Image: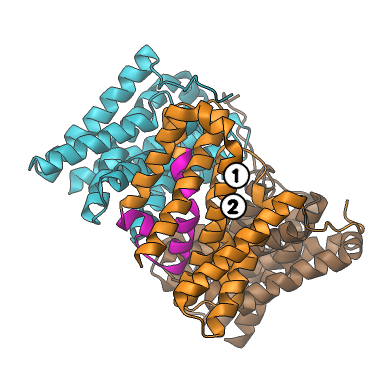
Chain colours: A orange, B brown, C cyan
């Protein structure tokens, strides 16, 4: 399972960059950067674990998660100028983190016996929960709500994981295929600026 | 217990209409509508179950809850014009959902051994927690805080449940009496536009 | 352990004053004042207990906590003019509550086997989580993010607790030394208006 932990930590790291960088742009002090780096990176996984009844959440039982967040926060603090210049790399890495978290969320939800809607919800929550906490703290419109295929990519990743699982594909490959699907959807959506339809009926 | 589940699902359905309709008014895309339909309808029950240590929460162990939310979201997406025209029905249904959730919250809290303040809190949280999440996501002033007898109606429902319980009334009747009381208070408050007093002393 | 419970309840009481007073300043009705008094005073401890897997949280198993919150809310409702005149006392008491909660958070986190980053997080979360919920509900910039040594004081208190613990100092003294350290840091920061550095690099 070492490769899975490595993937998970990679997702945590890029999400901590994303949260910390957002904090720096809002002119928060160094503690604020750390708070947002941690909340963005492990918030989704913690929400998932609390809802599944995993106590304490993985983010607290394996200290490597929090240390990885702190590393991400320190990168923002010391290299914020350079991070900004290469922000498209952060966005790309964020897409990869999204896919990895969606796949891991689906795997954990299935393991804990949730039904298919629950599995899709856990995919979306693991992948977007941290960003949601970041947006609430910074009082921004939550990204998940104006989502141009952000949460949707995570949900597609979760659906692919279930398809693989029920086709008898082993866990490792299912995780890779699922993460790759979500990442592909996310990259395609970013490249062509796709968005979900809005209803144009009577609601104003 | 089938009638209780049916009542609970009715509450979930009308709350998902309320959340989805609010999302449509904020011009969110169809995923945003689904997210708010689900969060509004099961958010309060999930908060209650997490606090009581019910893992995973009922909303995840019985997939019917989430499917009901999706049905509510679809109604908003396909019939939003008509829903809007009959919005007073949504408001009336919301009052019924409020009462049902308050009664169920009180029953679960007593079952898990909380004291009377805890029971009243769980009534209020079950009935208003989903709406609170909706308001936080849409960055509205939380309804629970400018409440013209919204949370108060739930608390009264919880108190009535406890009175019934300690008077030896069986669970089914206690639930019905409690829900009816909260619904009556809510309808009266809507009709006469009642509100709780504000303090007019030195606080400015 | 009676003195620990007494300290904890003292922290709960002053935090309920702080939350209730904030609600009164936002012209909320008496239920809104009670909601904020409760959320501010027990929110941090509930977040901590949920994350550590303590079900139900202490705030629900010992009704004294909630009754103390209600007492604080009533003080705000009946004496809000006088509370305002002596608001510096609320601020001083708040600093004491902060230190007490930081120490208790660290002790519980260690007891449940968290690593050192986790312990510091639980100190900060116990001490600042309630205020965070208050700020989210009132739609204020979270105090923890523009923190002039607020969360930092809690983290320092947590670090001192760990130092005491691993130096073999018994729990009671460790709690007192830790709380006193956090309180001292907080008072010094308030007096000299200390703040953490912001990064001045490329982030704009």
Let me know if residue A145 is in the magenta part: no
Looking at the rendered structure, which numbered label has been put on residue C16?
Answer: none
Residue B91 seen in render: yes
Q: Residue at x 91, y 65 (%)?
A: B82
Q: Which residue is mark 1?
A: A91
Say which residue label 2 marks: A95
CA distance for labels 1 and 2: 6 Å
Kindly identify which chain the residue marked by label 2 belongs to.
A
Q: Secondary structure at mark 2?
A: helix
Q: Residues within 10 Å of mark 1 (few under 14, many from 20)?
A: some
The quadrant where residue A22 appears: top right
The magenta stretch is A36-62
Q: Nearer the viewer, residue A198 or C150?
A: A198
Q: Left or right of B83: which side holds B201?
A: left
Q: Quadrant of the C terminus of chain C?
A: top right
Residue drawn at x 67%, y 42% as measured from the top left: A141
Say if B152 sits above or below B160 in the image. Answer: above
| Displayed quadrant of residue A85 | top right
Please report contact status of discs 1 and 2: CB closer than 8 Å, yes or no.
yes
Task: State the SS at label 1.
Answer: helix
Judge whether B124 appears above or below C189 on screen. below
Give the camera-side residue of A184 and B78: A184
Q: Position of residue C197 (x, y in %)?
A: 42, 20
Prevalent SS, magenta region: helix
Q: Is residue A139 above or below residue B201?
A: below
């Amino acid at each position: 399972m070492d490769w899975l932990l490595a993937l998970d930590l990679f997702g945590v790291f890029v999400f901590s960059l994303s949260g910390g960088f957002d904090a720096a742009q809002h002119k928060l002090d160094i503690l604020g950067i750390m708070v947002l780096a941690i909340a963005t990176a492990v918030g989704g996984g913690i929400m998932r674990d609390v809802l599944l009844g995993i106590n304490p959440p993985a983010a607290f039982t394996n200290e490597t998660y929090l240390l990885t967040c702190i590393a991400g926060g320190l990168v923002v603090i010391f290299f914020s100028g350079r991070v900004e210049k290469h922000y498209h790399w952060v966005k790309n890495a964020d897409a990869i983190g999204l896919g990895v978290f969606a796949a891991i969320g689906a795997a954990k939800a299935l393991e804990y016996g949730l039904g298919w809607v629950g599995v899709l919800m856990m995919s979306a929550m693991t992948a977007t929960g941290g960003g949601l906490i970041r947006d609430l703290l910074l009082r921004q419109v939550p990204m998940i709500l104006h989502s141009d295929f952000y949460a949707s990519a995570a949900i597609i990743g979760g659906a692919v994981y279930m398809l693989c699982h029920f086709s008898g594909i082993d866990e490792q490959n299912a995780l890779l295929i699922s993460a790759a699907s979500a990442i592909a959807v996310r990259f395609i959506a970013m490249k062509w600026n796709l968005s979900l339809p809005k209803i144009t009926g009577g609601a104003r």
